[in-house]
Amino acid sequence: MDVEESFDTEHLLLTERKCRVCGEVKDLMSDFYKIRKKRYDLISSYSYECKSCTVKRISESRKKKPLDTEWRYPDW
C-alpha cells in the first residue's frame, strides 16, 4: 500500500474549521476572519470565531444609544 494513495491534499490542507462559539463546522476561507495579514493563507492566520458570531458579539457589546437621541441646546 502506497502512503500517497491513502492521503489526499484535502487532508493536509484544512479547508473547514469548527467555530468555538456556535460549534458549527464552516469553510475556513470564506466564513472566518483573517487575523494575521502577513501570514498569507496559513491555517493559523485565521480566527477561531466565525464571521457571524463575531458580528453578533460586537453588536451586542457596543454602547447603547439613549432613548432621547434628539440633540438640544444646553439649558444655561
Image (cartoon, grey):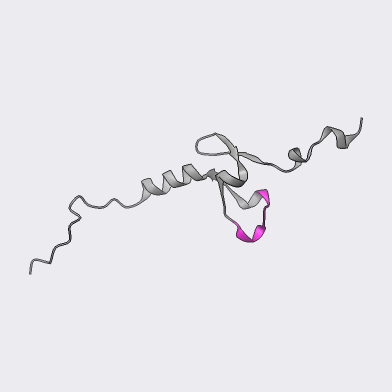
Q: Residue furthest left?
A: 76
Q: Residue furthest top?
A: 1
Pinpoint residue 36: horizontal percent, then vertical percent.
60, 57
Quadrant where the N terminus lies?
top right
Span colored in magenta? 36-43
Q: What is the tally of numbered marks visible in this picture?
A: 0
| 40 drawn magenta | yes
| 31 drawn magenta | no
The image quadrant that residue 31 belongs to is: top right
Q: Residue at x 41, y 49 (%)?
A: 58
Left or right of 43? Residue 20 is left
Left or right of 25? Residue 58 is left
Pinpoint residue 26: horizontal percent, then vertical percent.
58, 38
Q: Residue furthest right?
A: 1
The image quadrant that residue 4 belongs to is: top right
Q: Residue at x 78, y 41 (%)?
A: 9
Q: Residue furthest front?
A: 30
Left or right of 37? Residue 61 is left
Q: Residue at x 76, y 41 (%)?
A: 12
Pinpoint residue 63: horizontal percent, then vertical percent.
32, 52
Quadrant where the C terminus lies?
bottom left
Pinpoint residue 44: horizontal percent, then vertical percent.
65, 50
Q: Residue at x 91, y 33 (%)?
A: 2
